[in-house]
Every structure is written in C-alpha cells, then in structure tokens.
Image (cartoon, rainbow, N blue to C red):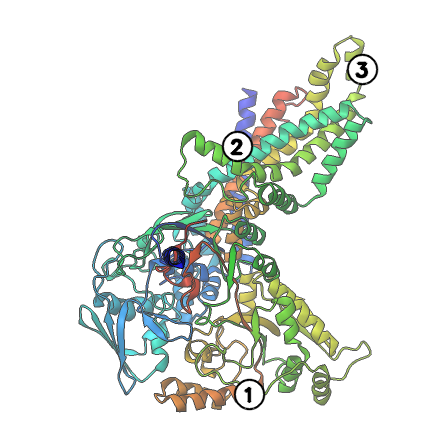
Amino acid sequence: MLRPIVRAALVAFVVLLASGASAQAPQRGGTMNIIISPEPPTLMLGINQTTPAAIVGGKIYESLLRYDFDLKPMPGLAKSWEISPDGKTYTFKLQENVKWHDGVPFTADDVVFTAKKYLVETHPRSRPIMQRAEDVIAADPHTVVFKLKEPFAPFIMAWEPSTAPIVPKHIYDGTDYRAHPANQKPIGTGPFKLAEWVRGSHIHLVRFDDYWQKGKPYLDAIYYRVLPDASARVVAMETGQAHLSAFADIETFEVPRLKALPHLDLTTKGYEYLAQMVWLDFNLRTPPMNDRRFRQAVYHAMDRNFIKDRIWFGLGKLATGPIHSSIPHYDQNVPKYSYDPKKAEALLDEMGLKRGPDGVRAKVTLDALPYGDVYKRLAEYTKQALGRVGVDVTIRTADVATWGDRVKNWDYEMTHQVLSQLGHPALGVSRLYVSSNIRKVLFSNVNGYSNPRVDELFDQAAVEVDDAKRQAMYSEIQKILVEDVPVAWILELDFPTFINKQFRNVVTSSIGVRDTFADVYMVPQK
Amino acid sequence: MQRLQFIAQRVLKGVVVLLGIIVLNFVLVRLAPGDPATVMAGEAGAADELFLQQLRKEFGLDKPLHEQLVVYVKNVVTLDLGFSYRQQRPVSDLLMERAPATLLLTGAAFVLSLVVGVALGVFASMLVGRWSDSLITVFALFFYATPIFWVGLMGVLLFSVTLGWLPSFGMYTVGANLKGAALAFDVSRHLVLPALTLALFHMAVYARMTRASMLEMKDQDFVRTARAKGLPESRIVRVHILRNAVLPVITIAGVKAGYLIGGSIVVETVFAWPGIGRLAFEAVLQRDYNVLLGVFFLTSFMVIAFNLITDVVYSLIDPRIELGA
C-alpha cells in the first residue's frame, strides 16, 4: 500500500533535485549591467592602470595567470608553469587555440613582445619587474622562458591583467604605443570584446565567440554604466537598474541599508591581491614628525576601532604593520599600538611638548585625502583625536591633482594615503620604505624614511630563494618598521561588492571584479 | 544699413574678446597645481621619472609655457582644439559627442523655464495680493533657494524609487536598441527629471523677475494713458506692459542661453547625463588641459554670440534703443 506513495515521493525528490541542479548549472545568455565610476580614460591596460580601466579592460585583456583567494597562481593564458630550483628561470606553457579578437592566433611571440618591449616602455609598475629578466625567449609557439638576472620570488605574482596585460604583437610592434588607434578599439584575448563606447554613458562589451575556454563566457553582454553620483549609484542598485557595484561605488554609510535588500548579495572577497591599506603619513623631514615618540603618540591617540566601526562601518581590519595580512610574509608578532591617550600624552610630555595655556602642545597640518566622503570623515576624526592629546590639527583640502602635487613635492606635514600591496611585499610594500626610492614621485618613499638595515633586508628578501629565510627577513623588517612608525598604519580596507542575486560566480578569485567574468552566469528570474 | 554696421562692429569686438579669453583661460588653467602627468602617475599607483618624462613630452608640457601658448593659439585659430592624451581622442570629437546631450537637456530646461517662468510672473502680477500670487511667490522663493542637487535627488526618490514611473539616470535605455518614435519617447522619459530639476531654479528666477518688472510697469504713465484711451486690459498687458517688462528677462535669458552649451555639472552628475558639463568637471579634476580649454572656448564663443543676438533682439523689441549708441 505504501509502495506507490514511496515511489511518488522518490520521483518527486528526483525531479526536485534535477530542477535544483539545472538551476545551479551555468547557463548561456543574459546581460549584466555594472556600475563604473569614474569613467576609464581608455581600456588599454598597458597604458592606464586605474581601477575602472582594470575592471573593464580585465574582460578584454588577459595575463598569464590569475590568483585564488589565497594568492596561489591559477592558469590564465598560461596553462602551467615551472620555476627552476635556483629561482632564475620561469617557464610558462601557454594555452593552445587562443585567438586575438581580430582572429589572429595568440603565440609565445606576443608574450615576448609584451614583456621585452611593450611593458618596459609603457607601464611604470611593470617596468622594474620586467627589467629583472635578462632574456625572454619563445622556446616554441606555446612556451615562453624568462631568464632572470637574479632570483626574484615575487616574479610569479606579477601576472594579473592590470600588472601585465598581454598585448598583440601584430598590432603594436614598431608603433607609437601610447598614440596607437587600437587603444580606442582594444584587441585582446579575453572573453569579451568591445562593441561600443558612448562616452559619459556606457561601455558595451559582447561575448567573444572564439574565446579559448569553450562554452564560455556565459553572458551575452556586459554594459558598464557610467554613474558619477554616489546617490545615483545606490538608487541604481536598489532599483535593479544595475546588477553589480564594487570598490568605493557605494559609500560606506549606505552599506548597512543595501545589505538588507533581499535582491542583493554582499561580499568583501576579491580584493586580496590588491590588499589595500590606509595609513597616516608623516613628513619625516619636519619637526615634530621627525621624532619617533611623536609618531608613536599619534598612533596611540587614534581609536582605530572607532575608525573601523563608525567611519568604515566595519569594512576593514585593524592594520598591525606595513604588510597587509592577506599577502605573503605578513607577521603579526610586532609591537602593538592600542588606543591609549594617556600613553600618547606621556610620550609627548617626554618629548618636551608641554600643553600651552590654550592646551595646545603642537600645531600640525593634515592634508585630507581627496578620495571621497569617507576620507573627509577620517581627516575630521584625526583632528578630533589628536586635539584630545593637545595636538592642534589644521585640515587642508584640495582636489586630487593638487593633493598629488603637494605630496610628491614633499610639501605636507601629515596626510592620509591608501595604496595596494599587489600580492607581495617586494611589489607593493618596499617601494614606500627603501631609501633608494626617496623621490619626488607619488607612491614612492615621499616621507623620507631611511634605515640602512631596512634597505638591506628588503634588498636581500627580494632575491632570497629560501622561503623560511625570506620570512625571517620580512619579519625583522616588520618589527623594525612598527617600532619606528614611519607611518601610522590604520586599516586594511575591505570593499563592499554588491551583486544582484540573479548572477552567480561573480567573484571567483583574489582579483575580484577585475577578473575576466568568463564564469559569470545568470539564473532565470522566478 | 545701420543695423549691419552695428552687427559688424559687435562681431569684431567679439573676436577680440574671444582671443583675450583664449589667452586668459590658457594661463589660468596652468596656474592650478598639478598637471595631467602627475594625475596619471597617481592613477597608475606607481610612477618613475621616465614615466613622467614620457607623459610630459607627449602632452607638450616639456616646452616653455609661452611656446605652448603660441602653439595653442595657432591651433585654435584654425579650429583645431587639440588632443586629449588622457582620453586618446581629439577634443573636438569629445565636444561634438557630448554637445547634443547637453543641448537637449539645457535647451529643454531653458524653454520650459522661460515660458512657464514668464507666464507665472505675468499671472502673479495680475493677481497681486491674492492667494494665487502668494502661492507663485512661495513656489519661486522655494525653488530659487533650494540647491539643485537636492531637488534632483528628491525627484529620483519620488518618481523613480517610490513610484517607479521614471528612470533615474542616463539619456536612453541602454541596450534596448530603440528607433524612431519609440526612441524619442524613451529619451523624453529620461529627460523629464533632469530637465525639470534644472528648469525649476531658472523658472523661479524668471517668475520673480517678470512679476517685479510687470508691477513696476503697471504704474507707468504710458499704461495709464493706454487705459484712459479705453484699450482692453488684455491688450494693455500684452502690448504695453509685458513688452516693456520682458526686457530685463530677455537680457538675463540671453546671458543664460550662452551658457547652455556649458551644460550643468550638478544635474548631469546626479542623473548621469552624458553632457559637456561633466566632461568639463572631470577635465578639471584630471587636469586634462586641452579638453578644459576646449569647453571654455566653446562656452565663451556661445556667450559672446548670444550677447550679440540679445543686443540685436533688444533693439528690435525696444525702439527706444539707438543702434551704434
């Protein structure tokens, strides 16, 4: 008697399972509307590395590798790779049947051209990495060999699309790279190609049918909508007019509200490679910033939990030192700077900076970082926090160009800065502390920190082959720097990525929304 | 003949002023700290001296300022507005791409604000002291005093988010591939909120100005004479009062018409309208000198041209104005 019921229940279960499974399986078709702000100046990643350019250009251009959430390399245009035991030879086996968007086959010659000629001329971040190669050889059409002058462990971390986009030799070789018309009609190997760009409105990418990963991408098209106003971006996500926002598209104070909307998912993953950190920078050439006790006092005067919870609405983690916890060689065993205004006052007293009749010990100017509301709030908080221990802060505001001009010319006392660490301390951290990089150029060692031991350790660690030895060197660097406080590291930043629930597989690597989106698919609406 | 001579003189003066503006703009833009190379280096997240040198050479920034100025003026005289190295495109292309969107937005707002504003002003002046006059005055004061961006955001909140009647951004439905009447209807729907937002402020200005000017004219001797002659009230208002009262409105409208091509930074930003205002704003932030100078040139040209047109229209409407005076 029970048998038919059991059979029916079983059938129903199987049908349910099957329908569930089919709903989860990637499906072809669909269009994704993504917020982009500001509008990228060009999509050619070789000549522009802004985040918006990397987000859109990352669908058009590819590099040899991608990186998982733990920063382990994954195949990109290279299907496999080998590093010689002496750490000086890197051999990449390339994917076969890869075509450029104009139909020309992609070969090892393109990689050789990109590394030897193109990037060393156009790409300020990639140039010092590629110049470490003594030679780059196309061993066969699908094998590239890099012979380095000396071992350089982070070399394997330099192959994501905005750091090393592979460009077509047949288009660029022998031309003026920056002025080439192809920069407006990019030809890459990525899963999407440019269909139309209406400046000020949108960028339309369409599926590249000859993409080397058969069956991918799943989406038919992507529209990047240029939305310069923060409120308009929130409305676009809220009303479903846009399906994806990332980085600083949504102001931190709007995050709790959007998070509660049933049609949106929130993730903070996908920023591990960039590993952005915000810090308070001191110009070490000027008193009182040239006194370590003053810098330590400032560090103790800031309640960084307040900054994290009230300014970033929980989107971040307290930084413990110069290296972000998501990149290799991070060491948390360093001196800690807890919120301790009394200790801050004691340090300032020890320096001889006594409170005057007006309660002020010292006057300092802070250049607010002109990157949006959250940084204005950070500057205002810093003024209040330092004011409590008797340091009177005057906030100086400016636009990005003026701020950049002041900082690069060392014309500042304190400023906030935010920068990516690019997957490895040798790529994104050492540049801020080694004395050989004290230059009048943004994102170099502008504050003038100089410590021969730190210089030596950074130099040695970059070429050290042994992991344990390298770790010991980076650990010592972190200990010295945290004691010296050349800058006060505030937060490791998390960014909110809001994804409309109709879309799956959006953030699948540490490159996040800058990745190719070959795996993104849309599920039918119920 | 006298009118032609008047126009020729004004055109000549306009050309001289325009040349002066070109030089002044060039110098002013260069006085701002930072340059495009610094901005681009900052965006790259890394830079070195070689990178900065390359960029400065490409932008022509490695030459002395006076040489750059001479090259720029020579180019502008031949209507070559230069190249945006940041966007990798000729400035004239960028301006031409954005001009239709800007003219549609600012033109629609201009016509709407002028027609409705003047009508409200006339209406209020005729019913002075009554509740409808008070209502119009309060309306004008409210929109005159309220920041445009706030009006825009409230419009979005009400009509897009709450009611879902109108799109909140863009100029048309991207990806819909509409043509003909369907496209026109779609653009109109997108135009409503930004055009109304922009128009409300100017509408308030015109309404207040027309009302004040009408009230001033109402008590003039020639109006009393017209009434004594027994002319119908509608004719007195239309021909005698309005024709005189509208002169200051035309002056202001003429000046504002010149700025139409410059777009509206605030409205274009809030509604993601792809116009020249935003292009100019972004060019300021990015120190994209040639684009900024191109927008300045175009705006200056239009302001001078509309001033000229206003003067001519003025002389046509008001026979008391002597040409060549």
Of circles 3 and 2, the one toward us is: 3
Q: Is label 1 in a helix, a strand or a loop?
A: loop
Check residue A62 in the rendering and tell me which mark sits there, or answer none.
none
Quadrant holding the N terminus of chain A: bottom left
Check residue A334 in the rendering and tell me which mark sits there, or answer none.
1
Residue drawn 73% across and 35% down? B139
Q: Is label 2 in a helix, a strand or a loop?
A: helix
Relative height, residue A128 to residue A8 (above, below): below
In the image, residue B22 lies at what x, y percent?
Answer: 51, 46
Residue drawn 46% across and 80% down? A430
Q: Amino acid at mark 3?
A: Arg
In the image, residue A254 lies at what x, y percent?
Answer: 60, 58
Provide the chain ID for the residue under circle 3: B
C-alpha separation, residue under disc 2 versus residue under disc 1: 73 Å
Provide the chain ID for the residue under circle 1: A
Residue drawn 68% across and 69% down? A381
Write down the quadrant of residue A178 in the picture. Answer: bottom left
**Which residue is situated farthest in the top direction here?**
B230
